[in-house]
Amino acid sequence: MFGIDRYSIPSLRIFGIISDTNISLVSDTLSSFTPLVAKFTTTGESVSIGNVTQTSEVTSNSFSSNLVYTVTATDGTSKDYTVTLTAPRTYGGSSLVLWFKADILNLSDGANVQTWNDFSGKGNHLTQVTYPTRQPMYRLNQVNGLPALNFSQASLTSMSYSGGTGFSSINSGSFFF
């Protein structure tokens, strides 16, 4: 059996999750797609993207769209791997004004959340200090093994916007994360 065993982008300190022939990476800090150099290990004879031979820790590629790596075995058979780099800050560019990440919170399952920081860089944090019984609950392993915050309508769970930049809220609204 041949293929790609490991994949990372050292300059971003991110590691790929390999599932069959798909390799997924996520960068929380990348704000624009520029050529990046990947580090990978393979059990194949050669690796290429199109007609360009790929050398681990040497060849740079633009990740603005999915990359298809072709791994060729010594017997000439090949297998394609699709590499996807997701970088949430690139989606909206300067229009990204809210980004909340439950996986960055270091809490135990069932803990109440008093503050939830915005990662858009705009400072639009959420808090609930006035009514502790209305704080959302931190829950582990909710979506694809990742944590989430549970806002319960029965207990009127809510958080207040602390005022950053680029976001205005009149009265109230609903947000889906």
Image: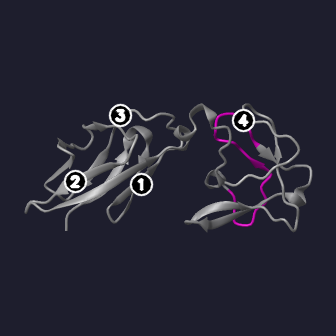
User: Of label 1 and label 2, which has the lower sequence position?
Assistant: 1
User: Of label 4 and label 3, which has the lower sequence position?
Assistant: 3
Query: Which marked residue is nearer to the observer: mark 2 or mark 4?
Result: 2
Q: Which residue is mark 2?
A: 70
Residue 35, disc? 3
Tell me which corner region of the image, top left, top right, bottom left or bottom right, holds residue 157.
bottom right
- Image quarter where the N terminus lies is bottom left
Residue 26 horizontal/vertical position (percent) = 48, 49
Q: Is residue 88 above or below residue 177?
A: above
State which region is magenta.
107-125
Residue 79 horizontal/vertical position (percent) = 22, 61
Q: CA distance from mark 4 to mark 3?
A: 29 Å
In contact (CB < 8 Å): disc 4 and disc 3: no
Q: Assign a secondary structure to mark 2.
A: strand
User: Of label 3 and label 1, which has the lower sequence position?
Assistant: 1
Q: Which residue is mark 1?
A: 24
Circle 4 residues within 10 Å: few <14, some 14–19, many ≥20: some
Instruction: Please name the amino acid that badge 4 sits on.
Output: Gly
Query: Which marked residue is nearer to the observer: mark 1 or mark 2?
Result: 2
Q: Which residue is mark 4?
A: 123
Q: Is residue 71 magenta?
A: no
* Residue under the image location 77 percent in, 48 percent down: 115
Instruction: Please name the amino acid that badge 3 sits on.
Output: Pro
Q: Is residue 152 above or below residue 26?
A: below
User: Of label 4 and label 1, which has the lower sequence position?
Assistant: 1
Tell me which corner region of the image, top left, top right, bottom left or bottom right, holds residue 132.
bottom right
Q: Main secondary structure of the magenta part?
A: loop
Q: CA distance from mark 2 to mark 4?
A: 42 Å
Q: Is residue 120 magenta?
A: yes
User: Of label 2 and label 4, which has the lower sequence position?
Assistant: 2
